[in-house]
Amino acid sequence: MTRRSCPGDVRGVIAELTDEGMDTLRRAAPGHVAAVRDALIDPLTPEQLDHIAEGLGEVSRRLRGCGGSGTVSSGGTGAA
């Protein structure tokens, strides 16, 4: 992995995978995907997965709406 400064944010760092890092990621991916599916996807019902997708969709919409700064104004119900 290589790192470089983020031109738009002095606090940020851009990490880039090297060819060797990408090869490592490709080798690890199948086992990782299987472990995530076993632990987080398979135990849930289709309805539960729909609710998760709906909630994450809302998070994504709000993050896109803030210009990607990571700062989101509260506008929800206050429920955690």
Image (cartoon, rainbow, N blue to C red):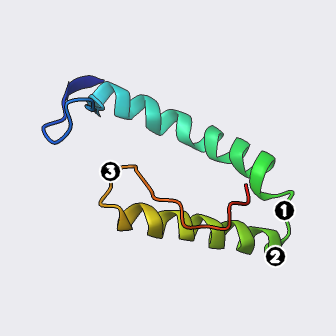
The three-letter code of the residue at mark 2 reads Glu
Q: Position of residue 65 (x, y in %)?
A: 37, 68
Could you say whether the residue bearing mark 2 is in a helix, strand or loop? helix
Q: Position of residue 69 (x, y in %)?
A: 32, 50
Q: Residue at x 26, y 29 (%)?
A: 11
Q: Which residue is mark 2?
A: 47
Left-right relation of 61 to 43: left
10 Å crowding of disc 1: few (<14), some (14-19), many (20+): few
Q: Residue at x 55, y 70 (%)?
A: 58
Q: Position of residue 21 (x, y in %)?
A: 36, 27
The three-letter code of the residue at mark 3 reads Ser
Q: Quadrant of residue 7?
A: top left
- The label nearer to you, 3 versus 1, is 3
Q: Which residue is mark 1?
A: 44
Could you say whether the residue bearing mark 1 is in a helix, strand or loop? loop
The three-letter code of the residue at mark 1 reads Leu
Q: Position of residue 20 (x, y in %)?
A: 32, 25
* Of the pair 67 and 16, the residue shown nearer to us: 67
Q: In 3D space, how far apart are the residues under numbered discs 1 and 2 (Cα atoms)? A: 8 Å
- Mark 3 or 1, nearer chain start: 1
Q: Residue at x 46, y 70 (%)?
A: 61
* Of the pair 30 and 35, the residue shown nearer to us: 35
Q: Which residue is mark 3?
A: 69
